[in-house]
Amino acid sequence: MTNEFAHHTAAATFLTVPRRGMVVGAKLAAAACLGGLFWLVATFASGVVTPFYLHSQHVSAALTGWIVVRSVLLSFLAFVMWALFGLGLGTVVRHQVAAVVGGILIYVGSDAGVQLIAHLIYNVYHHGWLLSASVIAPAVASNVMITPGQAFRHAPPQWAGLAVLAGYCLIITASGMRLTRSRDVT
């Protein structure tokens, strides 16, 4: 989306298909498919490498158990949601470098920053909910969502990570759709 606005190709697209909602919907579907494709490649690579690694560590684990399958399926949702989040961010922030750097900062910065702040406050007040609250960061929510069991001490359940990440995805994509419908593209 950022390139389309920068190179003014969005104008031709919206003149060809005047209903912007359809165009944005198609872009969302394409982003979701691309996220699914990245998930497929990553899951295939992990599925090939993991048995060899586990064997080298003398660990036997069933990769077809429900816990593993659930994490793989939740990982699929995470890949799709991050792809949609990226599309939404690229729609809201029209400059491509700013959108990419912003996305990286949101992922890495929110993870490190929120975890650091939560642990610093926890060291003073010793309330478990302070560590659980770090799920408000998108990267932490993603980690909580795909990790079987507890992702970290006092981590909320997987559904909480899913809800937080879905909320961020919904907010940024809805904002992007709204801006795309209302902005002038010339």
Image (cartoon, rainbow, N blue to C red):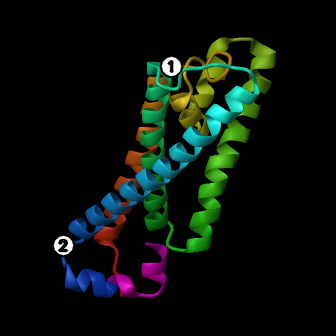
Q: Which residue is mark 2?
A: 19
Given residues 111 and 150, the one toward you in this image is 150
- Please state if 139 lies on the left or on the right of 161 as rendered: right
Question: Label 2's element?
Answer: loop
| Residue picked out by circle 1 | 157
Quarter that holds the N terminus: bottom left
Q: Position of residue 72 (x, y in %)?
A: 48, 34
Q: Which residues are the magenta region?
A: 1-10
Going by the image, does 100 lie left or right of 41? right
Residue 155 x/y as whole percent = 60, 20
Is residue 3 shown to the viewer in this render?
yes
Q: Are marks 1 and 2 in contact (CB under 8 Å)?
A: no
Residue in the foreground of this view, choosing between 183 and 6: 6
Q: Measure the alpha-carbon separation of dots 1 and 2.
A: 40 Å
Q: Main structural element of the magenta stretch: helix, strand or loop?
A: helix
Left or right placement of residue 15 versus residue 35 in this view: left
Which residue lies at the image location 64% right of the left edge and 19% below the top edge?
Answer: 60
Residue 154 in the figure: left or right of residue 57: left
Q: Residue at x 66, y 54 (%)?
A: 105
* N-term-proximal mark, 1 vs 2: 2
Quarter holding residue 18: bottom left
Placement of 6 over or under 119, stated as above or below: below
Identified by mark 2, the residue type is Arg
User: Which amino acid lies under the numbered mark 1 shown in the image of this protein?
Assistant: Pro
Q: Give the crowd class for mark 2: few <14, some 14-19, many >=20 residues within 10 Å.
A: few
